Amino acid sequence: METSSMRDTDDATDMVSRIKADNKQAEAELVERYDRSVMSVIRREVGATTVADDLYQETFRIVLEKIRRGEVREPKSLSGFVCSVARNLVIEYFAMTLRLFLTMSDIKLIRGNEII
């Protein structure tokens, strides 16, 4: 008896194969299938901002690139892979923001010979 999770696994494996074969329809299916999950992961941490939209786009760019290069080792776990890419991008975003903040707080304003 075939369950829906078995069907999803087979569908994900087939989708990965078709994307590797440069099937644009499969790429559109990937975005459609994981659209809500990815946006949910991102918006939970970032909120509904243009940053969330940028991270959303970047998630799918990276996922498609990794699939095309054969870097998805477990196609049957595609859902987890896609969501982990989104989570990692959120983490990178906050790490970059923190680094920028710390760098900016270290900058001293200099007027003439006087440090402000």
Image: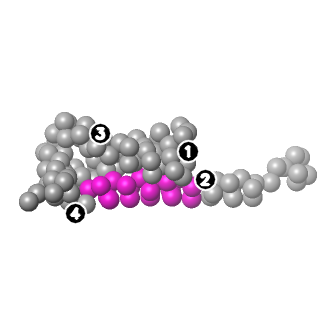
Place of residue 95 in the rendered image (x, y in percent of width and height, measured from the top left): 57, 59
Circle 3 — which element? helix
What is the magenta range? 78-96
Residue 60 in view of the camera:
yes
Residue 58 image-quadrant placement: top left
Is 81 colored magenta in this rendering?
A: yes
Label the magenta part by its dominant secondary structure.
helix
Q: Is residue 71 visible?
A: no
Image side of residue 35 versus residue 48, left or right: left
| Mark 1 lies on residue | 47
Query: Which of the two labelled residues, at mark 3 and mark 4, occupies the earlier sequence position?
Result: 3
Q: Are marks 4 and 1 in contact (CB under 8 Å)?
A: no
Contact between labelled residues 2 and 4, with CB atoms less than 8 Å apart:
no
Q: Amino acid at mark 2?
A: Thr
Q: Give, as a three-letter code, the residue at label 1.
A: Gly
Q: Amino acid at mark 3?
A: Glu
Residue at 75% from the left image edge and 56% from the top image edge: 105
Please say which color scheme the image uses.
one colour
Outermost residue on the bottom side: it is 73
Check residue 36 for magenta coloring.
no
Type of amino acid under label 4: Glu
| Residue placed most toward the observer, 69 or 109 | 69
Location of mark 2 (residue):
97
Q: Earlier in the sequence, mark 4 or mark 1?
A: 1
Q: Quadrant of residue 10?
A: bottom left
- Mark 3 — residue? 32
Tell me the distance, in whole angstroms, between the alpha carbons under discs 2 and 1: 15 Å
